[in-house]
Amino acid sequence: MTMATAMVAAVLLLLTISPAAAAALSPHFHADSCPELESIVRTSVEAALEEEIALAAGLLRVFFHDCFPQGCDGSVFLTGRNSEQSLGPNLTLQPRALQLVDAIRAKAHAACGPTVSCADISALATRDAVVFSGGPNYTVPLGNLDSLTPASAKAVMTLPSPITSSVAALFEAFRTRGLVELTDLVALSGVHTVGRAGCRFFADRSAKQDDTFSKKLAANCSVEPDRLQNLDVITPDVFDNGYFKALMFNQGVFTSDMALVKDKDTAPIVKRFAGSKDKFFKQFVKSMEKLVNAPRPDGNVGEIRRSCSSPNGDDGEKEDFAVASA
Ligand SMILES: *[C@@H]1O[C@H](CO)[C@@H](O)[C@H](O)[C@H]1NC(C)=O
Ligand SMILES: *[C@@H]1O[C@H](CO)[C@@H](O)[C@H](O)[C@H]1NC(C)=O
Ligand SMILES: *[C@@H]1O[C@H](CO)[C@@H](O)[C@H](O)[C@H]1NC(C)=O
């Protein structure tokens, strides 16, 4: 190798390494490279939610499912064999919420070039959906790269399940994500204030018919099995503390919701949030700021995906991911 080709090789090596050596996350990460970003995301989210308010819950759910398994890395958007979407929890992800994030990414890339990841778009869109629905604003760190592969099935399966009746089990799932206080679990469960669910996700509760509310759930589902039940029966479309107020009347839809009001350690927190929207919002902001920083076990490595559903190297064929080992 001549001196010149060695130098070219060294430069190329630097060029290929630099995207992976990600700069520190910051709310202002895109301020110079894509100053229009925040307004593009906000106007797109507002237009979409004006058409369909249920997308707020859809975006929140996608974001939680992205951040929980291995940090907020856009891994949930990948499709294909062994993707996170091919696993059980995918059944509750709204296709239109997934599509909305990719549509916003396309707009941002058209305006600024491919400088913003699907992970960042998802984080911003989710925050704007919370604010648009009446919830509090919070700070989102930007600069996350999109993962090259999906999270492992093992990591995805640690997502908390609606049929979990034990606060200890729910808390265990949260604790390992840096959500180390019981108030984090209760405050983040508060996103159910705008949530909806199909009958099969609370069939365990409605089958018992052990109170007026579960009888009503069962009756509704027997008439209309495909209906969507509001998780906040008081103010279903508004991001507020109605979910906690309903819990105080034992009107939680999921077994995991009822667990929060039955457990002696979480019940006082539910009561506090039911009594004060302000207290709920203050804690929600703190807990969300922990979730957006959920640990990425391999660090911030990856790429800016040109399409949220596949890695850039993809040739357009359906992606076939190897089963991840971790
Ligand atoms: C979820 O994954 C299962 C199993 O791969 C698949 O059959 C189903 O169609 C997927 N559901 C959605 C909504 O993509
Ligand atoms: C939320 O706060 C951020 C600053 O952290 C600001 O840039 C953004 O415009 C706010 N969003 C809304 C909808 O007020
Ligand atoms: C049952 O259906 C009625 C009528 O659609 C609805 O108002 C109610 O919220 C549903 N669920 C429960 C638990 O009452």
Image: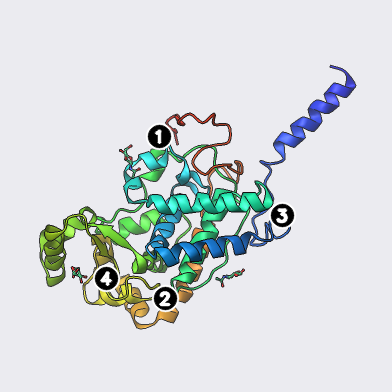
> Which is nearer the eye, 292 or 59?
59
Other residues around mark 1 within 10 Å, as few (<14) / some (14–19) / many (≥20): many
The residue mark sitting in front, 4 or 3, is: 3
Other residues around mark 4 within 10 Å, as few (<14) / some (14–19) / many (≥20): many
Q: List x then y, in percent, for residue 60.
A: 43, 59
Q: What secondary structure is found at the residue carrying circle 3?
A: loop
Q: List x then y, in percent, for residue 77.
A: 47, 45
Q: Which residue is mark 3?
A: 33
Q: Which residue is mark 1?
A: 82
Horizontally, is 33 left or right of 201 in the view?
right
Q: Which mark is residue 261?
A: 4
Other residues around mark 3 within 10 Å, as few (<14) / some (14–19) / many (≥20): some
Please identify the quarter of the rendering in which residue 325 is found: top left
Quadrant where the image shows the C terminus:
top left
In whole angstroms, how far apart are the C-alphas of marks 2 and 4?
15 Å
In the rendered structure, which amino acid carries the disc numbered 2?
A: Phe
Display coloring = rainbow
The residue mark sitting in front, 2 or 3, is: 3
Report the image quarter containing ligand 1. top left
